[in-house]
Amino acid sequence: MAPERSVRRVTWWGFAVNVGLSFFKIAAGIIGNSHAVVADGIHSLTDTVTDIAVITGSYFWAKPADADHPYGHKRIETTVSIFIGLFLLVAALAIAWHAIWDLRGERISQPGVIALAAALASILFKEGMYQWTIRVGRKVNSVSLAANAWHHRLDALSSTPVLVAVFVTIIHPAWSLLDHIAALFVAVLVLFASIRIIMSGFKELVDEGAPVEVCRQIRDLAESDRKVHHAYNIRTRYAANRLQVDLHIAVDGSMSVHEGHRVAESVKKRIIEKGPGVLDVIVHVEPVESLLPEDICL
């Protein structure tokens, strides 16, 4: 199955789960007299926004390179992942705000067992969707799908204090303070996850290069060809968590154009196959006789 189809398939399932859980939690919260479960259901309904963003975006970033986008459309996926990160950031701040605000009051309603069941179902289903989505995201190397997977886990995490609060309140209504404390803890976890997603996407948009160790690995792969004297001027940038590499190789100046091209293609193939998540490679062939000492560096 094509990567984009895998992305859409798992995201459509996530969309269906979000809609189903949302209405179930809202109904269970109303019937079971739990404001926390109702709020959790409304929060799940907002998750459909990121599902739609991933599904819609996958139709665009899968397009091949064209005259207007010679490097392809992978930056669209990066943009979608940043959008999801911002959405998670807002959700984290909202959870924290409501938890702090609710500390000013007292919980007076005592929820029923159906509210407890709704919170438990939310945790099980959303953690299951997280595991499936993150596995597919890693398999197809999709940053937006990995970001959306964390959104599923956010739901599971945010439902955990609701489950604890409902359970404790059923047994001892005076202990509802635990709900707000746990919600604040969840908000901090989600906040760090959202910042990580946003920063990862931002680094790609500003063309941050790969670490020195990765560049050395690319150089070693290029120089493993016995006809390559040196690999140098290695430049890298990320696109949808994949590396685009640009480098120069120095070969014997008496080599024919045809042979130089063959060596360049061989180096490119080796780096793509054995390199650390390489998307594409541009190889410039130079005569070793014109190489200066200062050129022999990363």
Image: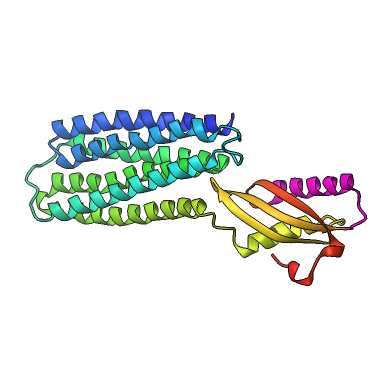
> What secondary structure characterizes most of the magenta part?
helix
Quarter of the figure with residue 286: bottom right
Task: In the rendered view, tell whether residue 145 sits above or below residue 183.
Answer: above
Residue 134 seen anywhere in this rendered image of the structure: no
Q: Residue at x 61, y 39 (%)?
A: 70
Q: Position of residue 18 (x, y in %)?
A: 33, 33
Horizontal side of 31 relative to 219 (left or right) equals left
Q: Position of residue 67 (x, y in %)?
A: 60, 35
Q: Which image quadrant: the N terminus?
A: top right
Q: Residue at x 49, y 41 (%)?
A: 77
Most extreme residue toward the bottom is: 293
Magenta stretch, residue numbers: 252-275
Q: Is residue 272 magenta?
A: yes
Foreground residue among 113 and 57: 57
Q: Position of residue 168 (x, y in %)?
A: 18, 49
Foreground residue among 52 and 119: 52
Foreground residue among 117 and 251: 251
Horizontal side of 269 relative to 252 (left or right) equals left
- Give the tally of numbered discs: 0
Task: In the rendered view, tell whether residue 140 sits above or below residue 94.
Answer: above
Q: Is residue 197 magenta?
A: no
Horizontal side of 19 relative to 4 (left or right) equals left
Q: Residue at x 17, y 56 (%)?
A: 100
Quarter of the figure with residue 147: top left
Q: Which image quadrant: the C terminus?
A: bottom right
